[in-house]
Image (spheres, helix red, strand yellow):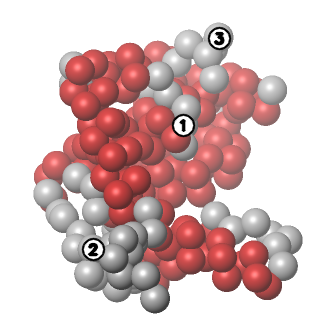
Amino acid sequence: MEDQIAISRLKQGDLNGLETLVCRYQVQAVRAAYLILQDRSLAEDVAQTAFVKAAQRIHQFDDGRPFGAWFFRIVVNDALKLSKKHERNVSLDEHLDVSTVKLAMWLADPDPNPEQLVEQKETRQIILKAIQSLPPGQRAVVVMKYFFDMRMSDMSVRTGRPLSTIKWWLRDARRRLRGLMEPTKTPKGDRR
């Protein structure tokens, strides 16, 4: 209901509506862009630009649909475009930077016990590092699928890629992530 009021205000030219939407979606927008770009300042720029675009295009928004899904498609598309522009690959050997650690902390449950905290932090760092190792297109489909619960047909439309490419990216990303996330296996003859 709060989104509808904010959107209605924005459509009438009242920028206070945008403020409400920024307060509600800013953190998620930066997180999503960061997961694709792997750069905090670029992610913040993408989020800010996405809010401006949303305000400019608010008359194109269908009030019968959820605002969040529409807005996050703008974020993901802009992050993908910027990622292609920078074509930046992150090494698996690279140490986690401060912004990655902060992102992992944002994702943490506020009430875990100390053991859970350590385990969650390690797991999130492993997941973030694994996601960082993916090419930008695969990072984008992982974010769209698992963070925004988008259908593959919607991903195809939003990225301008054929459905077969989206399916292949997602399948290959899962395979890569599974390989990176599995514990190292000891050979059968090497039992100690």
At mark 1, the secondary structure is loop
Classify residue 132 by image quadrant: bottom left
At mark 3, the secondary structure is loop
Q: Which mark is residue 92?
A: 2
- Most distant residue in the bottom direction: 192
Classify residue 10 by image quadrant: top right
| Front of the two marks 1 and 2 | 2
Measure how far apart labels 3 and 1 are at the Cα level.
18 Å
Circle 1 sits on which residue? 148
| Front of the two marks 2 and 3 | 2
Measure how far apart labels 1 and 2 are at the Cα level.
26 Å
Label 3 Cα neighbours within 10 Å, binned few <14 / some 14-19 / many ≥20: few
For the question of whether residue 85 can be seen, the reply is yes
In the foreground, 126 or 63: 126
Where is residue 24? Give x, y as percent.
68, 47
82 in relation to 155, above or below:
below
For the question of whether residue 40 can be seen, the reply is no
Badge 2 amino acid: Leu
| Left or right: 177 in relation to 1 | left
Badge 1 amino acid: Phe
Where is residue 53? Give x, y as percent.
41, 36
Circle 3 sits on which residue? 64
In the foreground, 14 or 79: 79
Badge 3 amino acid: Gly
Q: Looking at the image, do the residues carrying marks 1 and 2 touch, with CB atoms under 8 Å apart? A: no
Q: Going from the N terminus, do you reach mark 1 or mark 2 first?
A: 2
Which residue is found at the position 50% from the left and 73% from the top?
A: 125
| Front of the two marks 3 and 1 | 1
Which residue is found at the position 44% from the left and 25% from the top?
A: 57
